Amino acid sequence: GKRRAPCLPLFQGFLSGTEQGRCYLCGFKLWVPVLQNNQGPPLVGLITIACHLVKEAKRSNLLGESAEGRAVVQQWLEYRVTRLDGCTKEDSKTILKELNIHLQDNVYLAGNHFTLADTLMYYGIHPLIVDLTVQEKEQYLNVARWFDHIQHIPSLRHHLPPVVVLRNRIYTSRHH
Amino acid sequence: MKLFVSEGNPHCLKVLAALELTGVKCDVQYVNHEEKVVQFLNHPALPALILPAGQQLFSANAICRYLFEVSGQNYNDHCNQWLEWEVTVLQPALLRALRTAVLQGKGSDVSQILQSPLNFLDQSLLKGSKPYLTGEAVSVADIVLWGALHPILSDSSFTLGEHNSVKTWFDQVAAVHSCQSAVQKVLQGKGLQAMKSYMQRQPAPQNSQCRDAQPCNNNPAESEERQHFVSEEECEAAVLAWNTGLSSCPAPDRQHPILPQEGKRNVLVTSALPYVNNVPHLGNIIGCVLSADVFSRYGRLRRWNMLFVCGTDEYGTATENKAREEGLTPKQICDKYHAVHSSIYSWFQIDFDFFGRTTTEKQTEIAQNIFWRLHKHGYLVEDTVEQLRCENCQRFLADRFVEGTCPHCSYPEARGDQCDKCGRLINAVELRDPQCKVCRQTPVIRSSKHLFLDLPKLESQLEQWLEKSTSTGDWTTNAKQITHSWIRDGLKPRCITRDLHWGTPVPHPDFKEKVFYVWFDAPIGYLSITANYTSEWERWWKNPQQVELYNFMAKDNVPFHSVVFPCSLLGAQDNYTLVNHLVATEYLNYEDTKFSKSRGTGVFGDMAKDTGIPSDVWRFYLLYVRPEGQDSAFSWADMAMKNNSELLNNLGNFINRAGMFVTKFFEGCVPVMELQREDKELLAVVGWELQQYIQLMDKVKIRDALKHILNISRHGNQYIQVNQPWKKIKGEESERLRAGTVTGVAVNIACLLSVMLLPYMPLVSQTIRDQLNAPQSCVYTMLQGSGTFVCSLSAGHRIGTVSPLFQKLEAEQIEALKKRFGGQQPEDEPSNLKAPLQSTPSTPAAAPAAAIKVAAVEGLDSEKAEQLVKAVAEQGDKVRALKAQKAEKDVIAAEVSKLLELKTQLALAEGKNLEPTSKKGKKK
């Protein structure tokens, strides 16, 4: 199957526009974004391009404030492209479960600060969250909370439909 | 800082190499593959690095990056790109290659699997024409790729084709001392074989890269239950039950007055008495009357001898205030709103045996009797209370008759009992700048004598009773907890008298100007309402041996039913029936806020029918989200979703298909059924769901039980889908027989569903049975004992006309409703009309509003009326404009006649006697 990586232009708008990105079908049968630069060879790969654009936009703080922070951000970017992209329905449950536990003690993926990892995870997880029932959203309460928080960050959501996240719980347990 | 690695794990190669190369100080601990260092990940992830500040890195590449960065080497775009390529392209291929080589011993496949990434790497190195991936020196990219490729490239047994540039690069990196020592540590000279136990623990790679290709199953429990294994015995038992046939017992008749009967389960059900001066909102409805109704209907199906009573709670200051505001007497206010409540509950099909009220002679009689008994037994004590008194109005200002500045938060409009801003309870004498609510004069503090119920003296009796009742009855957890916390905090004497007029008079001569405080008085309403229903009311209320009492309420009402009222009855010592089962719901919120009358947020009982959504659907959704065990929320979007997915696509779809098959394929007669193993299994599974339903309903788990109904129709849909009777009917004889069996079983399940649905959706339930022409005896057959699924429509039975049961709720419709009930609607929206009504009743603007409000209550079309008011105004403007422009006479005449037509419609929509609105129309 072919899967289109989340469109980079989305992300560029958020960084107040730099280069034009485009998608093409690479030799590995996955949609991978490519950034054609004026100087130097094109850049390939979602993480690579996103990090590049963040630096261009002088928003390097989005990549982490310290060596530790940067490593954590990179780790979650990797999680996003390796675990989330192209995951099966079964995987998606595991991912939501893992994120839910992680976000129990973390405001953002990389701790207390909003980073690029949150942005890319948001774009990646959006189709999953849209499909969740109200009950499932409650099951993954922390993810829902995080997601709702991220989707309300100005100019981040773009054309993606907002997902309704209830603040009050409806269901007590997942089993009936 | 601590690094966790495991032997034989290839990902540890790069990490250990990077650690040595960068010289970063770090403890290294060897653990086994199963060690869960990073707790939240589903599968153990190694290597893992615990950073000094406690963060955990579980990605080998992130660890390498970090080690390189703290040693002063930064990564660039190029480096990033290689790392990304490694995880997204190379690793998946390597995982497959290593699986085939290590686990399946098929080394020959490795070359083919890795060909493409190795080609890419080779060409990149060739084009870059530098010794290392990103330049002249070893970078994190080299270490990461080397580590990844080492197991394959260092093993000469693989024939990988010509990748000269790769080979040169690899040998150079492999020669780095740190890499050699990492290999020694991880693989210990055993090569690929060292990785065997690691590889065995790795999940198999996914064949599909696309999640969309997977079947979508939104309900995890559904798939679990579908796999419920059915044994041979269960099948046989199900068939036996199926063949027992309908009960020949006559349907129990519900002849009033219903009285306890010897040898029967006599169940008395009450739902908390709604306060008369408010229109109940959905939360009130689900909390008490609707829950109690479902349980009573269920009990009747179980052939229990049920009595369900309720009524409006009418005494108290709020009623007096309301009367003053509306210029009516308290009695008139009660009459008016009692009718409002009655009509709302009847729209929601709340099937009371009796819906009474507390302002009756029986109330006075019974309350005063209990009072004298308490007095006689020494459970009442006298005390003096400081109170505010308005000299101008010549009376004590109880509770809400006084307003002032909150002593806690300085909110200027705090009431005598509570501050609306900070929510704290206030003793009226603490208010700063108090004002009489009626005349706005400043009251003075005077002391007044009052009577108190001596709860501490009754405490031990109460505890004894509570222990027995809570352990033998079905008390909800919140009811037990709230009661427990009241007892734990110690009971204090509670004042039972009030300086008011609108209440049950205190009969004691020393207190003759006073009335009973509502909390003491209101629960006695259960008794007096029953007394108004039957003169033999004591057979229910003074008969704990024969009667089981269920109280339904929201959790805020628990202490009055579990502590205070039982104390009154225990102290009165007259063998009263005390509550056996206290069923309290949590709160239902509106969307993600509270229901608020003043802000116009939420759906109130009288508006539900204006939505055009059938009463049964309202009942279904409210019960589906019944706040059982936890607060829940009413959400329009969720309601639409549940209507469309559960009612329309699941339940309605199944019942309709089952009926349609009988009609279309078998001329409306139930076909002959020859049960196969598969059918028997289905009977067993449906029977199991039915038993779950009964067990839950017996425990008043109303919401949970509903899920089992929906499970049954899910099973049914699947059964139809798998067996495809619409195809088999066109086949040969044996296939046609099969189509008949499936159709017959399905239509019988539909009949069972109608019975199980009865407590929830009485109209739909009856409609199903009408459509199936089902014998009424099925209603009283299947829910007996632990539940039996019997064949109630046997071969040859002729069914009626089948038609769809539910309608789709469209997104636009729901959006419009959400907007309408959201809270910030324009002035003239119906849900806001209460506000002007309460505060300034005599302003001209409020008058038509009030008129429309009443119209809505009486079942007239308020929404239409409003649209018409607007249309009349617009048309009026148009006519005036035309006249001003001196337009042609017949043009004006045509518009005037339109205006008159609109006015006529408006009058009809509002009811004809609504003066204020028509006057308003005339002026224009």
Image (cartoon, coloured by chain):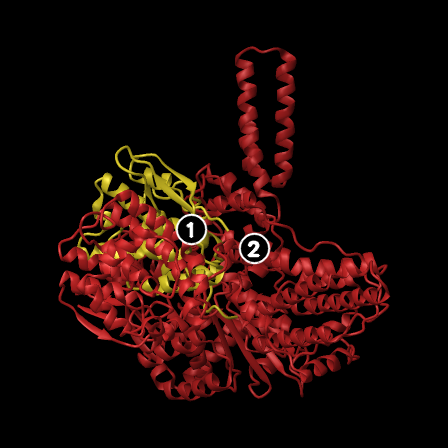
Chain colours: A yellow, B red
**Which residue has dot 2 on it?**
B340
Q: Nearer the viewer, residue B549 or B184?
A: B184
Q: Is residue B728 left or right of residue B557?
A: right
Q: Amino acid at mark 2?
A: Val
Q: Nearer the viewer, mark 1 or mark 2?
A: 1
Using the image, tell me which numbered label, if any, was put on residue A126: 1
Question: Residue drawn 61% across and 67% down?
Answer: B711
Asked which secondary structure carries label 1, the reply is helix
Expressed as whole percent of the image width and height from the top left, the position of residue A167 reads: 39, 57
Chain identity of mark 1: A
Asked which secondary structure carries label 2, the reply is helix
Q: How many marks?
A: 2
Q: Visible in this render: residue B678?
A: yes
Q: Is B869 located above or below residue B562 in the figure?
A: above
Q: Nearer the viewer, residue B768 or B832?
A: B768
Q: Amino acid at mark 1?
A: His
Q: Is residue B70 left or right of residue B807?
A: left
User: How far apart are the alpha carbons under marks 1 and 2?
Assistant: 46 Å
Expressed as whole percent of the image width and height from the top left, the position of residue B877 reads: 53, 22
